[in-house]
Amino acid sequence: MKYLIACDLDGTLLNKNHEISQETQMILRQLAHDGHMVVITTGRPHHAAIHYYNQLDLDMPFITDNGGSIEHPRNPNFKPVRESIPLDIFHNLFTQVEPIISSAVYTSNGVAYAYKYQRELEWLFSGAYAYKLIEKDFRDLEVSPCGVVFLVENKHNTNLEQILDNEFSEHLNYRFWGNDDIYSVYEVYLKHLSKAKALDFLLQYYGLKKDQLIAIGDGINDVEMIGFASVGVAMKNAVDEVKQVADYETHHDHDNHGAALFFKDFFHIK
């Protein structure tokens, strides 16, 4: 059986230095050579993921922005799919949360748009910020995001969640990415948007069945696709929420070729 193999980047294919090891490159190229469809499926925007796509010499669509964008860089006949928060909803959201947020950022077409930019948000983007940074009141922007990240003081978490639950639950979802002693990080995105939905689109596009889908990941934004896949794989370093929905867990983490070694055993690659 030939599989569509969906691979997260940060914490999965990439080590702590944001590199794909030679071992991992070799195994993924072998899988593609054997006729499997290797698809990068990442929360990074296009500009921060295309380098890895090219490095692996892939000839498949790839999924960025946590499912908000599906593109095929090597097939001009593939019509890109991009979904974003409607501007009226986005502007209304910003108006309501602006009094309690400390900072906010989103990216689009290689540009990062920020409100009261703070470096505390950079960890979420794994050093993958855009080429250009524009700081502005979001209500003055006409560029809609696939998702937006908010930095809030911990004391405002309940207020932010109440606004999102009470005023925007029809259209938007949110993820809590963690916190330190002062700040919490939230990602807000279209309610139906996920890596799983994007993968379902590709399955239908290529006429594949769900039992031909393998997905591997580590983060909270991978939960839907790991649970959706016929073979869901959690990295050894994955968060508990991913491990709870996975069928398998790798024996090694992302710094020790965990994904590559799993595929090597699963597909009996010598």
Image (tube, rainbow, N blue to C red):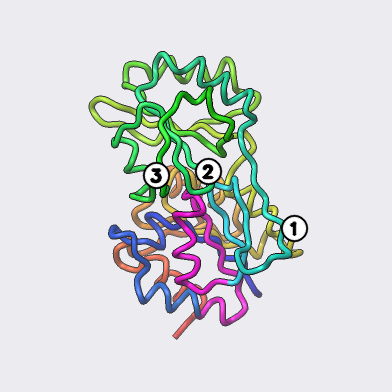
Question: Would residue 56 be counted in the magenta stretch?
Answer: yes
- CB within 8 Å, label 3 to label 2: no
- Going 35% across and 68% down the picture, which residue do you hit? 257
Q: Secondary structure at mark 1?
A: helix
Towards the viewer: 132 or 190 = 132
Part of the protein shown in magenta: 30-58
Depth-wise, is mark 3 or mark 2 nearer the camera? 2
Residue 240, label in figure: 3
- CB within 8 Å, label 2 to label 1: no
Which callout, 2 or 1, points at the residue further toward the start of the chain? 2
Which callout, 1 or 3, points at the residue further toward the start of the chain? 1
- Image coordinates of residue 142 in percent, x first then y, are 59, 31
Report, in whole angstroms, how far the alpha carbon at label 3 lies from the one at label 2.
31 Å
- Going 40% across and 40% down the picture, which residue do you hit? 133
Label 1 neighbour load within 10 Å: few <14, some 14-19, many 20+: few
- Going 39% across and 16% down the picture, which residue do you hit? 100
Label 2 neighbour load within 10 Å: few <14, some 14-19, many 20+: some
Name the residue type under label 1. Gln
Position of residue 130 in the picture relative to residue 127 (left or right): right
Depth-wise, is mark 2 or mark 1 nearer the camera? 2
Label 3 neighbour load within 10 Å: few <14, some 14-19, many 20+: some
Name the residue type under label 3. Asp
Q: Is 221 drawn above or below residue 38 in the view shown?
A: above
Which callout, 3 or 2, points at the residue further toward the start of the chain? 2
Q: Secondary structure at mark 3?
A: helix
Name the residue type under label 2. Ser
Which residue does the numbered mark 2 point to in the structure image?
108
Which residue does the numbered mark 1 point to in the structure image?
204
Quarter location, residue 1: bottom right
Q: Is 122 drawn above or below residue 11 in the view shown?
A: above
